[in-house]
Image: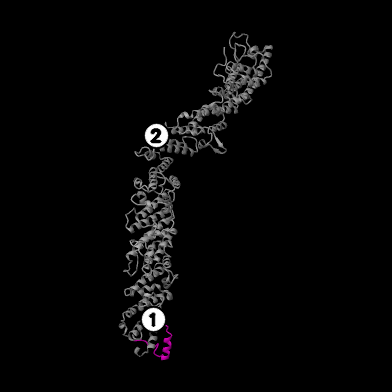
């Protein structure tokens, strides 16, 4: 029946069969009318009218037969021609003109397929199935039967269809793809790669499929035609450079940039790429297995990929154990890919082993240039840090280990920060990092602390040398992350940490008992001494058996051989502990609401003045003078007083002798003043007469200029006036029974002492007080004598006896005022009399008295009247207490003003 159909009817019938998906009838018609329905026409009819929803398996066999020009198998059977047999020729011509069959040659398909009608059909059919019906998932089954017949089609399907289908159907179900198959094919290489990887690692649940994506999306895509372009000859470094071939791929370059960007923003993706993808040889091409890169392309891909992975490790900014472990795994994987020597498979194992870098040439990577490369141009071939060489990888491994050690010690450190420390070699910054590491390590010490601190020491020393310590003589340029700091500094800081953490046994075993001591004895001594002082400064309780002072005591005795008990440093600390502990027995507040802390002793400008606060805040404390003297002496021996601070701890003890004398005088003066404040004149008086001595040298000379306290304290005691609050003496001894007279006599003794120790400029003022006190004593004696006379007249002399004391014996100081008044030669002595007596004594020793006379004239003018006779010109058989005081005052004036005119003050005050 088909043989009677006109060519127009055959064409219309073929279009009818195609429109209804009747492939069997179409094939039968084509086999019978092959001259009309030739191959290209049939393909155009199918391309135009075969519905896209028809499964490829329905017409794949027909297409294969058509490709082989073998449609004989479809000749048998009948045909339904009713659709066209009733049409007139004009209608056939008219309808045939309206078919508008699609062309097989199109700008949409690669030019390689213009001479291959079947491949062109398959490509155009694939576009239509995707864009018209959204059946991109069926395209592989359409193309699969023909891949073996056309290498070009196979390459196109592998590099374009497979990545696209996997991206939108197999790997990620994308109902509305951003691009159709045709649009994807026309994307630039960079845009295509970014599209293929746009879903890679975007969700946490997809992190395990990152390697699959690179293997199944990027790998096949790279094999496509036009993916590789020849590099301009001007950019080729060397013909001998086998690794860097003359071919480049813009899409591959985009992938490398994507990888390093992921490292900077989502490092887990970059780590997963390195771990899950085995490099350029690890590619899933689907059904095609015979596509391979050239050797030059393979080396280029491998070397540039390794460079990008190293760059990614540098760009991981997160300073956590997980991130650093990921960076280490990246380097480890690259070493395996490139065939370099094996290293520890995990970061934890590497840190425990602390490998040496002595076998690698990393010295050329150190410097400011490397610090710049670490931030810029990481993918450039000139960048030494990311060069896929074993030395560059060893350097990166060392930086990762360094950052990991810092992070594990509690001081988070990224690879970049470790690089900055290693490359810039700023000593000040490195010292700060060491201090930070030790502080953080101290804060997280736990378990077996000796073992822990031994590991900390090993890690810090490794950071200083990167394990190359034994090769410094031949490879001195290699320095660790903290290599700008001398090893002695690191060991010193570690020793400080041991002592601060109370690891005394460990410290002693390393720094004192070991055969090769890491530090010189002098350095160890000073470090221990300073550590003891730091413990002291951090103490809050002044009791040496507790807290910081106990620790200070333990530290200073932790190195018995290096720092024995006789060492000056040990003595200083011991003295410091003793004086601080002594203060713990008293209530002491220097600032309102703030209890006393030991550190105040070391920072105070004049720590001895703290004793004055103790005397003020603790009633009756002045009675414990020996304790305060010992306390002040320990302050001097500890080197915390202003004068003693300038003396080195290893200086002879004699250097502190003057300061000890000064401290003793100050303490005595403070206790005298404290006793007077509490109205305990008797104690103050006893301190004056027993503790304040006559100066050994002439006034104004040497150490006496510094003694501003003794004479003031004696003067204050001499100026003290009894009140109702004044404490009564516990016993009188041989003193006067009249408390007023007794008190005045004691005041005169205090003033006499003041005259002995006071500077010349203060003598006249003290003499005035002396005169007033003597007048008061004379008045008191006169009053007592008058009272006794009145009692005697009335026969009521208290304590009177009929017996008369033997002639020639010295009268008792408790004799009555009446008996004393009968001795005319012992009349009360005025200031003028005192001055004349003083001049008389001085005249026996001085050859010139002009200046002294002028000084005494002023004193004489103060007397109400002058007498022609003095008690000094007589020779009394008995001496009163006042005469003894007068002689003392006279000697004081001689020694006090005689030196001004060159007198010999060492002669006896009186001559026979």
Circle 2 Cα neighbour tier, 10 Å, few/some/many (<14 / 14–19 / ≥20): few
**Disc 2 vs disc 1: Cβ atoms closer than 8 Å?**
no
Please give left or right for residue 505 compared with residue 764 in the image. Answer: left
Q: Quadrant of the C terminus?
A: top right
* CA gap, disc 2 and disc 1: 103 Å
Label ID, residue 44: 1
x and y percentages locating residue 885 in the rendered image: 60, 18
Q: Position of residue 74 (x, y in %)?
A: 32, 83
* Residue 652, placed above or below residue 251: above
Give the magenta-colored segment's residue range: 78-100
**Within the image, what quadrant is residue 285 found in?**
bottom left
Magenta run includes residue 82: yes
Disc 2, SS: loop
Q: Is 775 positioned to the left or the right of 707 in the image?
A: right
Residue that carries the numbered disc 2 in the rendered image: 560
Q: Position of residue 155 (x, y in %)?
A: 35, 71
| Horizontal side of residue 433 vs 292, given as left or right | right
Q: Earlier in the sequence, mark 2 or mark 1?
A: 1
Q: x, y (%) of residue 138?
A: 38, 73
Nearest the camera: 675 or 655?
A: 655
* Quarter of the image where one finds residue 30: bottom left
Q: Residues within 10 Å of mark 1 (few under 14, many from 20)?
A: many
Residue 785: tell me if it is visible.
yes
Instruction: Return the residue nearer the eye: 666 or 216.
Output: 666
The colour scheme used to paint the residues is one colour
């Amino acid at each position: 029946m088909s043989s009677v159909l006109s060519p127009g009817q055959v064409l219309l019938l073929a279009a009818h069969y195609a429109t209804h998906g009747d492939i069997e009838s179409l094939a039968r018609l084509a086999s019978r009318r092959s001259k009309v329905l030739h191959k290209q026409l049939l393909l155009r009819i199918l391309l135009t009218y075969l519905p896209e929803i028809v499964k490829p398996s329905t017409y794949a066999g027909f297409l294969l037969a058509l490709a082989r020009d073998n449609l004989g198998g479809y000749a048998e059977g009948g045909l339904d021609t009713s659709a066209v047999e009733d049409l007139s020729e004009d209608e056939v011509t008219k309808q045939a003109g309206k078919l508008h069959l699609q062309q097989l040659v199109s700008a949409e398909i690669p030019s390689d397929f213009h001479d291959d009608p079947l491949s062109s059909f398959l490509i155009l059919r694939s576009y239509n199935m995707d864009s018209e019906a959204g059946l991109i998932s069926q395209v592989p089954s359409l193309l699969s039967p023909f891949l073996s017949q056309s290498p070009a089609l196979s390459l196109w399907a592998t590099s374009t269809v497979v990545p696209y289908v996997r991206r939108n159907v197999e790997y990620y179900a994308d109902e509305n793809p951003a691009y159709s198959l045709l649009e994807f094919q026309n994307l630039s290489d960079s845009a295509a790669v970014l599209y293929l990887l746009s879903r890679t690692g975007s969700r946490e649940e997809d992190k395990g499929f990152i390697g699959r994506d690179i293997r199944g999306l990027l790998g096949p895509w790279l094999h496509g035609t036009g993916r590789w372009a020849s590099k301009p000859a001007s950019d080729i470094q060397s013909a001998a450079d086998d690794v860097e071939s003359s071919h480049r791929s813009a899409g591959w370059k985009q992938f490398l940039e994507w990888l390093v960007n992921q490292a900077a923003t989502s490092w887990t993706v970059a780590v997963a790429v390195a771990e899950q993808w085995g490099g350029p040889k690890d590619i899933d091409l689907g059904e095609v297995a015979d596509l391979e890169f050239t050797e030059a392309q393979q080396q280029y891909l491998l070397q540039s990929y390794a460079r990008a992975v190293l760059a990614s490790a540098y760009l991981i900014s997160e300073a956590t154990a997980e991130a650093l472990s990921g960076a280490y795994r990246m380097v480890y994987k690259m070493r395996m890919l490139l065939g370099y020597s094996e290293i520890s498979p995990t970061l934890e194992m590497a840190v425990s082993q602390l490998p040496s870098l002595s076998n690698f040439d990393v010295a050329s990577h150190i410097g400011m240039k490397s610090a710049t490369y670490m931030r810029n141009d990481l993918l450039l071939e000139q960048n030494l840090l990311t060069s896929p060489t074993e030395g560059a990888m060893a350097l990166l491994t060392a930086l990762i280990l360094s950052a990991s050690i810092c992070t594990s010690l509690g001081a988070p450190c990224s690879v970049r920060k470790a690089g900055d420390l290693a490359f810039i070699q700023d000593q000040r910054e490195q010292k700060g990092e060491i201090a930070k590491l030790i502080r953080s390590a101290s804060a997280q010490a736990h378990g077996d602390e000796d073992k822990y601190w031994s590991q900390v020491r090993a890690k810090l020393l490794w950071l200083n040398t990167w394990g190359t310590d034994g090769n410094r003589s031949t490879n001195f340029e290699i320095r660790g992350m903290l290599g700008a700091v001398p090893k002695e500094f690191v060991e010193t800081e570690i020793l400080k940490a041991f002592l601060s953490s109370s690891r005394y046994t460990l410290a002693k075993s390393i720094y004192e008992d070991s055969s090769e001591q890491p530090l010189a004895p002098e350095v160890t001594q000073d470090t221990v001494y300073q550590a003891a002082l730091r413990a002291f400064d951090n103490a809050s309780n002044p009791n040496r058996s507790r807290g910081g002072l106990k620790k200070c005591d333990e530290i200073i005795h932790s190195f018995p051989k290096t720092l024995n008990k006789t060492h000056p440093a040990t003595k200083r600390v011991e003295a410091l502990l003793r004086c601080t502990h002594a203060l713990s027995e008293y209530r002491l507040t220097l600032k309102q609401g703030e209890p006393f802390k030991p550190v105040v002793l070391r920072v105070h400008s004049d720590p001895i003045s703290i004793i004055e606060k103790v005397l003020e805040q603790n009633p009756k404390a002045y009675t414990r003078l020996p304790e305060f003297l010992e306390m002040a002496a320990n302050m001097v021996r500890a080197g915390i007083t202003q004068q003693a601070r300038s003396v080195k701890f290893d200086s002879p003890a004699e250097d502190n002798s003057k300061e000890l004398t000064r401290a003793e005088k100050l303490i005595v003066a403070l206790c005298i003043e404290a006793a007077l404040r509490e109205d305990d004149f008797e104690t103050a008086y006893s301190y004056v007469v027993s503790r304040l001595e006559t100066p050994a040298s002439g006034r104004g000379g040497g150490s006496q200029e510094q003694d501003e306290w003794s004479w003031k304290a004696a003067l204050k005691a001499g100026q003290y006036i009894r009140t109702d609050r004044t404490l009564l003496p516990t016993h009188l001894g041989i003193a006067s029974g009249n408390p007023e007279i007794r008190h005045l006599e004691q005041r005169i003794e205090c003033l006499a002492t003041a005259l002995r120790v006071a500077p010349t400029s203060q003598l006249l003022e003290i003499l005035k007080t002396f005169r007033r006190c003597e007048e008061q004593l004379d008045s008191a004696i006169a009053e007592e004598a008058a009272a006794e006379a009145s009692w005697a007249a009335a026969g009521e002399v208290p304590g009177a006896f009929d017996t008369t004391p033997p002639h020639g014996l010295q009268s008792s100081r408790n004799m009555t005022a009446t008996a004393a008044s009968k001795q005319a030669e012992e009349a009360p002595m005025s200031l003028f009399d005192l001055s004349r007596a003083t001049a008389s004594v001085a005249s026996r020793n001085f050859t010139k008295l002009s200046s002294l006379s002028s000084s005494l004239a002023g004193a004489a003018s103060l007397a109400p009247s002058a007498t022609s006779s003095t008690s000094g010109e007589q020779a009394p058989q008995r001496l009163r207490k006042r005469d003894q005081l007068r002689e003392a005052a006279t000697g004081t004036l001689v020694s006090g003003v005689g030196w001004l005119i060159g007198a010999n003050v060492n002669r006896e005050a009186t001559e026979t």
